Amino acid sequence: MAENYFLAEDNLWEITEKYPETIDVLVSRGFKQIRDSSKREKFGKAVTLKQAAKLRNINLTRLEDLLISEIEQKRKQVDSTMKENKLSEDVNVEGLLPCPVRVPLLEALNQKIDELNFDVGLDLRAASSGVDWLKDKLAVGPDAEELSDIFISAGFDLFFDRKLIDKYRRQGVFKDSSGLNKLNYDFRKDNINLLDPAGDYAVLGVVPAVFLVNKEELGEREVPRSWQDLFKDDFKNSISLPVSDFDLFNAILLNIYKKYGKNGVTALGKNLQKSLHPAQMVKGGGQKKSGEPAVTIMPYFFTRMAKRFTHMEFVWPEDGAIISPIFMLIKEASLPQIQPLVDFFSSAQVGKILAEQGLFPSVHPEVDNNLPENSKFMWPGWDFLREKDPGELLLEMENIFEQAVKGRD
């Protein structure tokens, strides 16, 4: 269905930015200006897909089908390449990539692999598929030499659960050789230290959680400006959370607990109205139906699609957008052979893909993340993550949250 990728009300610039493979389709249907990047932005921002179909007298459903077919064909090509490379006796890279940037990252990665003189096996799945497959592999306790050479994923539970990857980290298996020793100014200005003082983890970027406020549903209530505002009784049965987006939801639970304690987690659960995937939130937010959530919590990326709704207001929390870091772990025993791959993932090229195509702020100091003014972040810190057992803590917080949801009426 089209809404899995875009909406008819999305403008052409939004669609082509997220799915560059659609450019040729639109050009072939008479939109020649879409091929030129400067014209594409100016023209594309002024024309929605629905309007484009009308301009060229094209059936909207047919145009959507053409675009979706091109997008899915590209994804099949990428996945086919991965399957060919999946098993390797030389070097292996495993993990999850955020859905909006997975295809461009894999395309750039495959170009890099073509330059190398060794085989590289890839199993980098879409974040929407979840991480259970990787947890299951690690749960059986493979020897360190059996582990993949590089792991990449957002979220805390996989990398910090003491029964999973953290078990190997404490054995000294990993070493950060990314060369990222100075953070992007967006993090430095707020004293958010994403550089691991122990030199185990590398962070490539972050997935921030922000608010989208439905002003029609908000009524006379004040627009929430902080996470703490969401705990108020005013927002009972009024909040939508991305519970199915496990990495981000876990980050929300950990950060709320760290800053506001168990009471904060309980208050958030009591005020929950719906558990939706961010794409569903955006689609539902445009329907202006009574009974929709007053506040949806979503990755910053999805606000790009929501800006077309005049009754929605985007809010970057004053106490900081909660972040789910995109971590990279590098097996020290595989160095220096895998260093070219490490350099690729920690490059400005990858940072720009994260920041520009996914709105995932990059840590690379040369990347312009183009964030709103006064944007802050919330992150629990390295000491907290090492002193606690995030795997066990998340189970406890999930239970507290679920009990609050059940007991809210």
Image (cartoon, grey):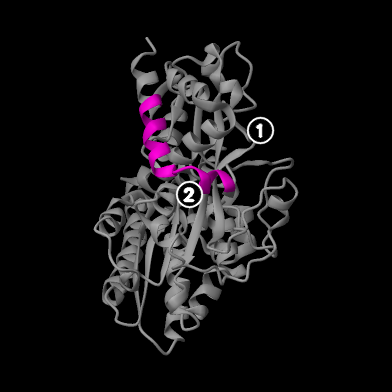
Q: Main secondary structure of the magenta part?
A: helix
In the image shown, does 56 or 164 lie closer to the viewer?
164
Along the horizontal axis of the image, is 278 left or right of 230?
A: left
Residue 391 shown in magenta: yes
Say the numbered circle drawn on residue 186.
Answer: none
**Residue 156 screen position, x and y as percent:** 45, 48
The residue lying at 42 percent from left, 56 percent from top is: 166
Q: If the image is split into quadrants, where does the C terminus sit?
A: top left
Front: mark 1 or 2: 1
Q: CA distance from mark 1 to mark 2?
A: 41 Å
Amino acid at dot 1: Asp
Q: If the image is split into quadrants, where does the N terminus sit?
A: top left
Say the numbered circle drawn on residue 319.
Answer: 1
Looking at the rendered structure, the secondary structure element under dot 2 is helix
Asked if the residues shown at circle 1 and circle 2 are in contact, with their CB atoms under 8 angstroms apart, the answer is no
The residue lying at 51 percent from left, 21 percent from top is: 263
**Residue 124 screen position, x and y as percent:** 36, 63
The residue lying at 55 percent from left, 31 percent from top is: 212
**Residue 111 screen position, x and y as percent:** 45, 79
User: What's the magenta region?
Assistant: 383-400
Hey, which quadrant is residue 218 in on the image? top right
Residue 52 shown in magenta: no
The residue lying at 49 percent from left, 62 percent from top is: 328
In the image shown, does 96 or 22 lie closer to the viewer?
96
> In the rendered image, is residue 28 in sight?
no
Classify 52 as above or below 109. above
Amino acid at dot 2: Ala
> In the rendered image, is residue 55 in sight?
yes
In the image shown, does 215 or 1 lie closer to the viewer?
215
Hey, which quadrant is residue 322 in on the image? top right
Q: Which residue is mark 2?
A: 52
